[in-house]
Image: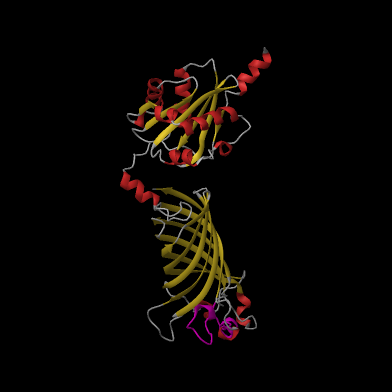
Amino acid sequence: MYKKIIIVIFFITLYSHAAEPTVWKDGEFLLWSYGKRYITPMDFCFALRYENEKIGAPSCYEAGDWERDTTLSLYAKWLNTNLDPRLNPEDLRPRNAHAIERLSKLKDNSLIFSTIKNDKAWFLLFDETSSEPKQIATFPLTEDSAKIARKLASDWFSGKPQRRLSDSEREAKEKEPDEYFAEQPMYDVWFGIGLGHTQTKVPLTPDSWYRHKLNSKIKNYRDVDDSTSIWFFIKDTSPIYRAYIGGSLYDFIGLEFELRKSSHKAKIDESDTIYNELDHWSFNRYELMFALEFMKVFKPIPQIEIEPYAAASFLFDIFTEDIALKDGYKGSESYKHRFKFENYYSGPALTLGLRTAFFKNYAIDFRAGIANRGTAIVTREIIGSSTYDAFVATGLEYHIRWK
């Protein structure tokens, strides 16, 4: 007796296929039975409206033409013979071409097959998207029609209903590219934080282009051989700390705003005794970056999106000085009249990047680029009238997406 109860409880379990069925508003539901009919169309339509208020006015029918079709009757008998809880849905797909064709022409109808096997009532859901069952459920024979109908309606058709397509809309949808590689018409907003690295030398370019600039030293707090670049005064390499926010339309074009910070030591000539009074001297660089991005989205598998992109940016840079004398020193005249950067620098930047998103909301971003910053006025007294540097960066992002 107890053994039978355990078996009955085990077979109440609902088996779900990975692909969720589409819920159509005002849809049609065909009840196809092999043997005893366990739920009535009236009970099932009532259950659909009760469990999903947005489903509209569904229509439920007995699938008489399916039951009268000789070939489909053989498939129904084969299903009854082979149903087993150890089988997967793909093991139950028909082999006959006629049965496969009938299933593919269901359009936006849902077909529910029912039969009795091993003292259980079995229910299989089919639709046009696949010839294998989308869902499988079993119930003990003691359950009545109304309870089974409500359970199936709740488990299979409680999702958000979609509008039924016209024949022309269906034809257009069938011609769309594969869903994994088609452009995804999404709206996207993201927030990110990350790290990077900046340096004057652009990879794969000759060292001779930079040797004079990188070896420069500041004498007497202000004297260098050339003032055209900021990097004659401060060290060119530094980590970058970054925070940014962005958004895109249709996964094609987007805007991004980024705040960066880097820190650069002054390149003093330590052989110059005037610096004996100096404790430290460096500059923090704060950058505001406004970028216009162009991207392309690929979806190799449902959980991952790969997004290469290119960006054209406008930069706005501000330097803040961090300097201090050793205890007991008041500061020389040279210290008081040391060089000063301009109030701000601006210029363009070009970036190439690759963003990889996981489960739609989380992403890792890699990017690299080259930037030019300077001033509109070019004179011998102006510091940093033309400054170039390259950068690489990575970031962790959170995305908010909707269609």
As drawn, is 26 to the left or to the right of 207? Answer: left
Q: Identify the residue at the far top of this view.
A: 1
Which quadrant of the structure image shows residue 240? bottom right
- Front residue of 282/162: it is 162
Name the residue rendered at 59%, 19% in the picture: 119
Main SS category, magenta section: loop
Q: Position of residue 262 (x, y in %)?
A: 54, 66
Asked whether residue 237 is in view, the answer is yes
Q: Which quadrant of the figure contains the N terminus? A: top right
**Residue at the (58%, 72%) spot, across then down:** 237
Specify the farthest residue to the front.
Answer: 70
Q: How is the image coloured?
A: secondary structure
Work out whether residue 122 or residue 249 is closer to the camera in this orientation and state it.
122
Residue closest to the eye, 142 or 70: 70
Against 184, is 271 above or below?
below
The magenta stretch spans residue 225: yes
Q: Position of residue 121 (x, y in %)?
A: 54, 22
User: Can residue 158 be seen by looking at this rendering?
Assistant: no
The reply, left or right, for residue 173 in relation to residue 124 is left
Look at the picture and state if 354 lies above or below 60: below
Q: Which residues lie in the magenta part?
A: 210-233
Instruction: State the image quarter where residue 267 is shown.
Output: bottom right
**Vertical side of 284 occupied by 250: above or below:** above
Q: Position of residue 364 (x, y in %)?
A: 54, 56
Residue 117 is situated, as x and y percent measured from the top left of the image, at: 57, 23
